[in-house]
Amino acid sequence: MAIPSFQIATIKGDGIGIDVTDATLAVIDAAQSRVGGFSLRYRQILAGAGYYQETGLDIEAEGEEMAGAADAIFLGAIGLPSVRYENGTEISPHLRLRDRFQLYAGIRPIKAYPNIPQKLSDDRAAAIDMIILRESTEGLFYSAAVHDRCPVETDDEVQDTLRITRKTTEKLHDFAFNMARKRKEKGSRGIVTCVDKANVFKSMAFFRKIFDERSRAFPDIEKGYNYVDAQALDLIRKPWDFDILVMENMFGDILSDLAGGLVGGMGMAACGEIGDNHGLFQPAHGTAPDIMGLDKANPLAAILSGSLMLDYLADKAGIQALSDAADVITDAIHSGFFQNAIRPAEFGGDMGTRAVTQEIIRQINS
Ligand code: ATP
């Protein structure tokens, strides 16, 4: 029987996006060879600020359709401060992909690895392991400038809109509870915390009401509540107590960076954006023009995003080998840090992008 094959659309983009994509594909290929049972085909899509400079297009013709036809999309990073659309904003075709494919579930894993400088002195910080699930198509970003949806925009006043819909919120909370179930099977605590401001805003009370409604289908999963301001405090006081935090777009934007800072910073910040039929995976960091071409980028945020992508494909296709390959990658990163064999320059270590990548591949093969 032929082994199942999946097509991955890759958009390397600009700056360090190119280096970290190459690193990720090399690591994924090593995991695939180690585990077997599936194959991946890559289709590169040209897009980004460099491409715009050359061609006047931010993504190649039919690029969005090609991305939509793939089983998953992997993106390095896009944008350079010096290259702008005529309206002065930075090149960002990936924001259109998020909108076009309605990628509502934004996953940001926040996990402490051994030997990365800890920001919190409490020993329990070594056990931080949570997911921030950020709704990514509505909330306050419904009014993001790119969408041009301000209800009031005069020289005297500007209003933005925070939009919460039942349809998206039901899917988001179901996603959170299902994810908690899967994590619980692997030893996590299985708690979903609804982070909102339900004491002040009707939209947030609605968000919480739907959380309660959907939770009834998941009696095995513990639920919790936190107002967003208290959650910011608790992320510093006791981040090890949380498992999955679900929240609207703007709260997630802020708290995911705060939480990412607790476990190493941008070079460790993985991200998955998932909709009903599509998934896009990319490091949460940008193109970091200050270090591009210097072999200094930490590829781990991208590689961890690649692992999320394999997990996503495993769920979508029901193929265990893909999930095993995802675990092979995270285990290699964990053991590499544990042995102090991964020492990224980002944390003051002596290893650049290529050396970190080679070490992860060595760990996978060992
Ligand atoms: P954007 O607005 O697209 O997020 P940005 O320039 O504001 O872009 P980043 O590109 O994420 O933000 O980078 C901010 C700084 O963090 C960079 O200048 C770089 O020094 C550092 N940085 C980001 N990603 C990495 C990485 N993977 N490895 C090492 N340093 C990084």
Image (spheres, rainbow, N blue to C red):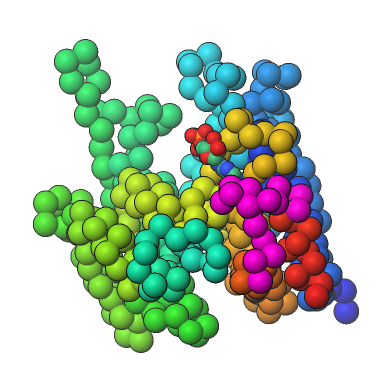
Q: Is residue 348 visible?
A: yes
**Which quarter shows the C terminus?**
bottom right
> Quick check: 171 left or right of 55?
left
Please check the rendered image and state whether residue 166 is part of the magenta-colored stretch, yes or no: no
Please check the rendered image and state whether residue 346 is part of the magenta-colored stretch, yes or no: yes
Ligand 1 quadrant in view? top right
Above or below, 126 relative to 356 = below
x 44%, y 54%: residue: 260
**Which quarter shows the N terminus?**
bottom right
Q: Is residue 243 visible?
A: no
x 71%, y 55%: residue: 356
Rendering quarter of residue 304 = bottom right
Magenta segment, principal secondary structure? Answer: loop
Rendering quarter of residue 236 = bottom left
Direction right: furthest residue: 1
x 73%, y 19%: residue: 54
The one of 322 and 65 positioned closer to us in this rendering: 322
> Quick check: 253 left or right of 5?
left
x 61%, y 40%: residue: 77
Measuring from the top left, give residue 79's x and y in whole percent.
58, 30
Measuring from the top left, give residue 217's x and y in whole percent.
34, 80
**Number of callouts in the render?**
0
Measuring from the top left, give residue 257's x and y in whole percent.
41, 49
The one of 231 and 202 positioned closer to us in this rendering: 231
Q: Which residues are magenta?
A: 339-355
Measuring from the top left, give residue 181's x and y in whole percent.
44, 80
